[in-house]
Amino acid sequence: RPSPPEQKRKRKGNVAMADAERSSIEIKVLLKNLDPTKTSIKHKDRLRRLNKFRNYVTARPPPEFYDDDYSLMLLGSESPAAMEDEDLSHMTLYGLLRAAGCPSTDHKDSLKRSARPAMSLLRYLCLGFESTSNGANDVMGD
């Protein structure tokens, strides 16, 4: 029978795993809603999803992420994680980098209106987000 400290560590590990699973789901929902080719997803829907994800990552304590989540979040379908995952390989996921540079269909030589909030979220994730990894705070889990 495990000692009480071992039981506590085991429980804490399961919570972190559940938190990381939720993060994976949040990322996938975000990326599905950034697809500008879907006519059912409007500008306000993309903004709402970007804001919801930002609220999720700014919560205290910060959420945990799996290593593969970072590349998926940034690259979408172009990430190795998406290409190797059977479920994700059949989806078109717009990563944050692609969403931040998505051209407007209405205005020549301009970006989509949702590109600015995507850039803002990227900037926050790269420069301001603190993840807890092994009990220490660091940027992007490094």
Image (tube, grey):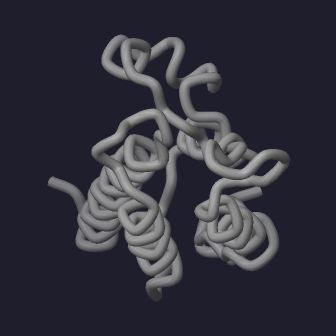
Task: Name which quarter of the figure residue 134 lies in.
Answer: bottom right
- In the rendered image, residue 141, in percent from the top left (x then y), is placed at 69, 59
Q: Is residue 134 above or below residue 25?
A: below
Residue 63 appears in the figure: no
Residue 142 appears in the figure: yes
Q: Is residue 45 above or below residue 82?
A: below
- In the rendered image, residue 33, in percent from the top left (x then y), is placed at 39, 49
Q: Is residue 100 left or right of residue 34?
A: right
In the image, 59 versus 10, the foreground residue is: 59
- In the rendered image, residue 10, in percent from the top left (x then y), is placed at 30, 58
Q: Residue furthest bottom?
A: 60
Tell me what residue is drawn at x 60 percent, y 41 percent.
95
- In the rendered image, residue 127, in percent from the top left (x then y), is placed at 81, 73
Q: Is residue 17 left or right of residue 104?
A: left
Tell me what residue is drawn at x 68 percent, y 74 percent.
129
Task: Name which quarter of the figure residue 6 lies in.
Answer: bottom left
Q: Is residue 78 above or below residue 90?
A: below
